[in-house]
Image (cartoon, grey):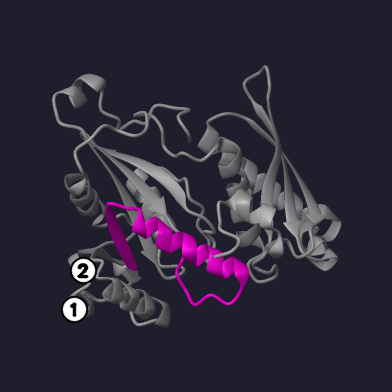
Amino acid sequence: MAGSRKRPDSPPPAAREKAETRCGYVALIGAPNAGKSTLLNQLVGRKLAIVTPKVQTTRARFLGIAIVGPAQLVLVDTPGIFEPRRRLDRAMVAAAWAGAADADETVLLVDAARPNDRDTQRIIGRLTETGRRTILALNKIDLVRRDKLLGLADTLFKTGVFTEVFMISGLTGDGIDDLKRRLAAAAPPGPWLFPADQLSDAPERWIAAEVTREQVFLQLHDELPYAATVETESWQERADGSVRIDQVIYVQRPGQRAIVLGDGGQRIKAIGARGRAELEKMLERRVHLFLFVKVRENWVEDPERYAALGLDYNA
């Protein structure tokens, strides 16, 4: 969380002074559900980005910060890149490509079990057109036979887009350390951009809203449309060290509100209980979480909501 605790892997200042510091931005791009958020969490060594089976869970660029010896990696988790059909889709895809354009290194994640999906092929095509070369992270290798993986890696490398290929599993952690060391070695020399104990640049209240949104998606995956959102309305520090967090889950229609509430309010109680447990783990203190559900019709056409997400309404 943003500067609130010391990370266990942070080298002491004296150790950094003996080595030239390095710092680089690394964009993680890929098709929806390729595993970008899971990889970011693995590289940081802590869960920061939410992960669900629902496509396009990540809506805006999100920074995670990893330390590797004298190197600081600023990891940019981007929305999945796909063929946009709506305004929100276009804004998310634009944010993903902007994250890649601004980075020192780009890692394209490819789901080894679905390497030929249209979104991945479209991404490779655009990288070919722009001449931008990236690192290939062939993800979810635990789901594919090794002989098939080798053939797939060779086929993708021959596209000419990739400088290197890493076989990883964001779920099990296989291959993550090798990729992390490679990214650290390639980081440009320079001062660190963030304090050694900072894990992200995102405010805690924003991350807290994301944690609740994760639970909404996990528990209502097949029932609630993609366009639900969560906002933290208030954050009150208490004298005993705990925090009270009030959040609103916004849906687009009254019928969706009933789905989130559930019979007798049981569904929202379950969402709140799991969200609270996750937040207490992340914040390392007691959390009092209060959830409300409101209807905000057609919020996906509201410029203010895009600004709140850090997205370009006119993309």
N-terminal label among 2 and 1 = 1
Q: Tell which of 310 and 266 is nearer to you.
A: 310
- Identified at 58% across, 48% down, the residue is 211
Q: Which residues are magenta?
A: 80-109
Q: How many marks?
A: 2
- Identified at 85% across, 64% down, the residue is 254
Where residue 191 sits, quadrant-wise, is top left
Tell me if residue 314 can be seen: yes
Q: Residues within 10 Å of mark 2 (few under 14, many from 20)?
A: many
Task: Give left or right: position of 39 versus 201.
Answer: left
Residue that badge 2 annotates: 162
Q: Tell which of 153 and 118 is nearer to you.
A: 118
Q: Is residue 140 magenta?
A: no
Query: Amino acid type of disc 1?
Result: Asp
Q: Position of residue 114 (x, y in %)?
A: 37, 78
Tell me if residue 113 can be seen: no
Query: Amino acid type of disc 2?
Result: Phe
Q: Position of residue 171 (x, y in %)?
A: 37, 58
Residue that badge 1 annotates: 147
Indicate the secondary structure of the residue bearing disc 1: helix
Q: Position of residue 277 (x, y in %)?
A: 60, 41
Where residue 264 sits, quadrant-wise, is bottom right
Q: Which quadrant of the figure contains the C terminus?
A: bottom right
Q: Residues within 10 Å of mark 1 (few under 14, many from 20)?
A: few
